[in-house]
Amino acid sequence: FDWCGVSCIRALRNLGYKSTIINYNPETVSTDYDECDRLYFEELSRERVLDIYERDNSDGIIVSVGGQIPNGIALPLDAAGAKLLGTPAKMIDNAEDRNKFSDMIDEIGVQQPKWQELTTAEAAMDFAAEVGYPVLVRPSYVLSGAAMNVAHTEEQLRACLTEAANVSGDHPVVVSDFIQGAVEIEFDGVGKDGEIIAAAIHEHIENAGVHSGDATLVLPPQDLTAYQKQRVRDAAKKIVKRLNITGPVNIQFVAKGTDVMCIETNVRASRSFPFVSKTMGVDFIEAATKAIVGADTSDMNLPTLETRNRPANYVGVKAPMFSFTRLRGSDPVLGVEMASTGEVACFGKDKEEAFLKSLLSTGFKMPKKNILLSVQDDFADDITHSAYQLHELGYNLYGTKATADMLNKNGVPCKEVDYPTEATGGIDPLAMIREDDIGLVINVPSYKSTRLEDNYLMRRTAVDFGVPLMTNLQLVKCFSDAVHKLKKGEMLDLDAKTLFEHYEEEEDSDAWTAVNEFH
């Protein structure tokens, strides 16, 4: 969002406008006093924003490039008479209010998971019994998926409903069917008077259930079918039209089989806008800013819904970064509530090369010899393929009893280790992690996991001693595929260059900025 704010300011300056930034985080580029004409270190509340708006006699307010907090005060600002630039406040509310949004999606004929507004706990239980567990509890107007939860049992659902009601306050809470094993797809775009003028579709490596801010993104998508991408384009066109969007928009979908279902629309820039802009070779926020103030974008070579194969000669992958090492005692496992505190993106000739580059750029160290696995029985079939691939590459596999038994039964050699809470005189996995005898810990739990403490101890010890940790099955598969290509010599270069070095090596015909411009 810092990048989005700065790109918006620079676009406004180039168009001849003076701009004001309100931001209370000093560790950002947008709070560099050289970037804008006026800078306020103030809270993002209705009262403070109105004070500044009136004091500076501003022409209008842009709320769509600063994340969720500015979006959350759009309605109060509009009600107070402030002029919001871009998408109308009422339409922002139609996207943020879960009940209004779900109604609207049904109305325009876009597929979505079955849903119901929460009225009573009993009604939610009846709905869950009708569609079947798991279900997703989704509050309205929340930051980073706060209080959003997947419930697999009635007991879990009751707890989730209480938390969501407390967080969502005056806004509706919706319960929807959670589609297990679905692929998550995102659409980032720019609208102008309800028409899409810039578009990008990217996919998550992780299946649905991991917050988009924690997911590993791939652009252009490598595993989506032409049918799935066309369904996304058709739905995005209807949603942008119905919400009369002018400015940035992010729409999220889940896909399984022939179903491509919309699960959320953010009428604002998303965390992926910098990644999308740099990978596609055009500044989506500059385009959004021009759309908001009515400036021409025809000379920007924007990718549209009709654009295919852009970029054509490389793949971009964005990987999240976490601060679990600084959060003593926290459990380093991902879910629908966001946990990442940063990200890094890399380009490669294919998905595997870009993935491995981005992973290494987060500080991930390639395992040298030994890998520890502890995986829930549900994932036995899938983990067997990846484990065999790692074994074939020369890694020694160690596993807790159930995992080792399953892998050995399936013909994948694996040495058994003790569970951390049940030492029987065998191999101590925590000691191996602490003594740097393990180069990678793969711990993939599910809601059925009963050895919660054992799983936590392995994950936490890995984080505390700087040993790479993977808790997602799709990431493990992508990693094993990538290492397989690396060992076979199919990757030419894993040294990630800086973006500036990448620009220096570009041909003039490939560059999307002039030599005197900076992005």
Image: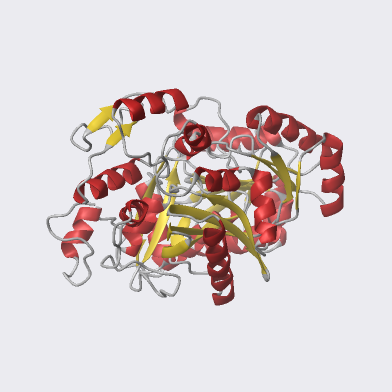
Position in image of residue 24 (x %, y %): 36, 26
Seen at 45% across and 70% down, the residue is 305
Instruction: Decide: is 233 above or below 118.
Output: below
Q: Quadrant of residue 170?
A: top right
Image coordinates for residue 177, horizontal then vertical, percent: 74, 52
Q: Quadrant of residue 450?
A: top right
User: In terms of depth relative to the viewer, which is nearer, 419 or 186?
Assistant: 186
Query: In the image, what residue occupies the spot 36% across and 39% down?
Result: 60
**Residue 329 higher or lower than 37, as above or below:** above
Taking the image as shown, residue 254 lies to the left or right of residue 66, namely: right
Quadrant for the N terminus in the image: top left
User: In the image, is residue 129 above or below residue 260?
Assistant: above
Q: Is residue 383 visible?
A: yes
What residue do we see at 58% from left, 48% from top? 95
Task: Tell me which colouring the rendered structure shows.
Answer: secondary structure
**In the drawing, does residue 190 fall left or right of residue 440?**
left
Residue farthest to the left? 516
Q: Looking at this view, name the residue that lies furthest to the front.
A: 81
